[in-house]
């Protein structure tokens, strides 16, 4: 039997529903783990258990969607595709190195990204989400962001769902976030006029000066979001890439052009409320003949190869920028995750555990 | 100069906003009218004024959308395509006979449907909405309903916007109304399972026993609309044809299937409120990857010939039923219009002024 090593973990204390998560909703614990895929002992099935991949986690991703993984979602009537259980490690996306595998698709030394757990080493049995990393000339952490789930979300949500046309007026909320910063840059590549909203002066400067947005504004400094949107879109909005919901969605509905499209990627302003805010301007959907599309990256696994072919050259040529906010050490994970819902992160929030 | 005849009119007293309209918001008045298109007297332009059609109104239509024509819509940021002015006759759709015309497309004796005014005789200068009636073997009043704007709305909204597939689960609210009763029957023609909601036992009976809906329920008797929809759609709703908004939309969002479509034709429950109700379940749009489409019949003028080719044979063969609630006399117009917002009408509400 392989020797045991210590395995630091971030454990979910209990489900967090209807309020902001805090660091004390999680705790750090050290367990022991054997760095070998377990074997069935004796009998007909003797040998390694089927379809298990043991990984060393390198980078863990903090994503707004994780809010749903740590809540009791029964009142949302959601079908969960992955979830955390109280007393077990937080789950989420990450980049990892395969140490051992009984799944023939993965072998020792492979680098992968996909759903893993907040611990140094993980046994992954739900291997469907794992994607082998082929390109290592770019930062590995990018596979939690521009080359991972957020990148796929931005590409599918913007190009496939929004179907933007050259010259259209595009608005992106949470525009400096993991997805928003890409949507804005994709909109410029598509020949659109793009404005982003974010929650600090520094983020607004980033959008305008580094990420190429035509305009950006700090929503926290606007008393009247409707007036702010009128200022930046006197002619109205053709495409809204929705990341925040609530008051911003209310204001956007008033400022959409006829036949405009709204793609709903997320609504981060709503995730921590006891109950979601009611949206009053829904009749605008009829008045303006709007098209609203909910989407999830999970429906777009098939576009990953096409997306990588599209995005890698831009990254290598420096034509796409990706801003990451990397904290070192698993023990800093709870603060990083909590900070996501207060807008503390500056760009894509990543936790670095090991660099290989 | 042609002799003057009396012209009974229903006049809008003042804009009605944020409350239910009442009969006293309108009054009946008798004016005089010359039954000839006016002439320019003397000078270079002498002759009939251009592009005016004088009609005798035969049937006037009561439509929920008229609520927007009699309100100050500035807070909705609506572009009005037609509106009533306080002190002038109510405007709306109707069927009329041409008595005189300076528009070469219309001549004396033609029957037309389109936007007219609530009076015995009207000069119509905005002739773009007028459509010449070619088929008179069906009731003329049908051109306010199944063969008019509501018919076009139901056909375009269901077949073009909802794009239903055989075997899908369809829900229609306000299902015994001018549009709803057609959507339900179209859904059956398309091979769908269709359930309708309405506001009385008699309407529910109509839906189930005369209009061929698979099921129907009285929303006023359901304390929990979510539970009611679960009962009728244990497997969820693929297509929702939205006519009412508010609580019904909240419940529908919880009961949509993944990738379901919602087509918003109207939201009659919201038109008389001081401000519209907030919809809390909008995150379901993302969770379930829903597609929501606002639409208006005004974008579908081009489908009228195709629609008539489709619908007339069904009417002639008795395979489509159209239920009308016809009141006689212009003086009964205000009560009929007001009744529409209380659900007093049983089927399409029409006011008959003259039968030819």
Image (tube, coloured by chain):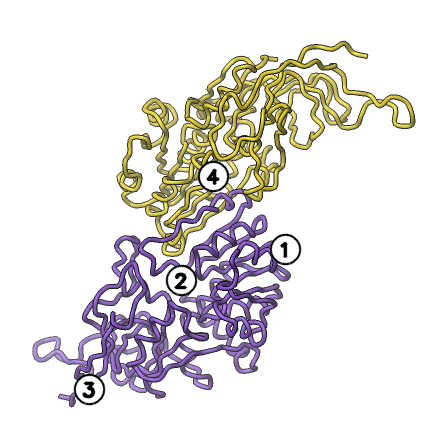
Chain colours: A yellow, B purple
Which label is found at residue A158?
Answer: 4
Q: Nearer the viewer, residue A20 or B325?
A: A20
Which label is found at residue B6?
Answer: 3
Q: Nearer the viewer, mark 3 or mark 2?
A: 2
Distance of mark 1 from mark 2, alpha carbons?
A: 26 Å
Q: Which residue is mark 1?
A: B234
Under tag 3, what secondary structure? strand
Quadrant of the image occupied by residue B227: bottom right
Q: Is residue B85 left or right of residue B227?
A: left
Chain to which the residue tagged by mark 4 belongs? A
Q: Is residue A255 above or below residue B333?
A: above
- The earlier-in-sequence mark between 1 and 3 is 3
Are dots 1 and 2 in contact, CB under 8 Å? no
- Quadrant assignment for the C terminus of chain B: bottom left
Q: Is residue B131 left or right of residue B188?
A: left
Q: Nearer the viewer, mark 1 or mark 3?
A: 1
**Labels 4 and 2 within one chain:** no
Q: Nearer the viewer, mark 3 or mark 4?
A: 3
- The earlier-in-sequence mark between 3 and 2 is 3
Chain to which the residue tagged by mark 1 belongs? B
């Amino acid at each position: 039997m392989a020797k045991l090593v210590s395995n630091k973990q971030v454990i979910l204390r209990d489900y967090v529903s209807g309020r902001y998560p805090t660091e004390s909703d999680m705790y750090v614990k050290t367990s022991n783990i054997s760095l070998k895929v377990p074997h069935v002992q004796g009998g007909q099935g003797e040998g390694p258990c089927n379809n298990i991949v043991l990984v060393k986690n390198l980078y863990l991703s903090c994503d707004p969607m994780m809010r749903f993984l740590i809540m009791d979602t029964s009142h949302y009537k959601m079908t969960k595709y992955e979830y955390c259980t109280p007393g077990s490690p937080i789950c989420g996306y990450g980049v990892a190195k395969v140490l051992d595998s009984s799944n023939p698709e993965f072998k020792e030394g492979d680098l992968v990204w996909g759903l893993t757990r907040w611990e140094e080493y993980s046994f992954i049995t739900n291997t469907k989400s794992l994607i082998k990393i082929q390109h290592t000339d770019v930062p590995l952490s990018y596979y939690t962001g521009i080359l991972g789930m957020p990148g796929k979300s931005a590409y599918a949500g913007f190009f496939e769902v929004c179907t933007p046309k050259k010259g259209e007026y595009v608005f992106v909320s949470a525009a400096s976030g993991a997805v928003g910063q890409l949507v804005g840059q994709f909109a410029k590549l598509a020949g659109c006029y793009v404005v982003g909203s974010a929650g600090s002066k520094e983020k607004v400067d980033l959008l305008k000066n580094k990420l190429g947005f035509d305009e950006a504004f700090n929503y926290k400094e606007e008393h009247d979001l409707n007036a702010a949107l009128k200022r930046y879109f006197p002619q109205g909005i053709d495409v809204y890439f929705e990341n925040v919901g609530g008051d911003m969605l209310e204001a956007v509905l008033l400022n959409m052009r006829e036949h405009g499209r709204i793609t709903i990627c997320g609504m981060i302003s709503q995730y921590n409320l006891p109950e979601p805010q009611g949206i009053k301007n829904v009749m605008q959907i009829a008045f303006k003949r709007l098209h609203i599309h909910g989407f999830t990256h999970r429906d777009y696994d098939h576009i990953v190869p096409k997306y990588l072919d599209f995005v890698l050259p831009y990254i290598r040529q420096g034509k796409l920028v990706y801003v990451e906010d990397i904290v070192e050490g698993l023990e800093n994970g709870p603060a990083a995750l909590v900070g996501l819902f207060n807008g503390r992160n500056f760009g894509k929030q990543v936790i670095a555990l090991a660099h290989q």
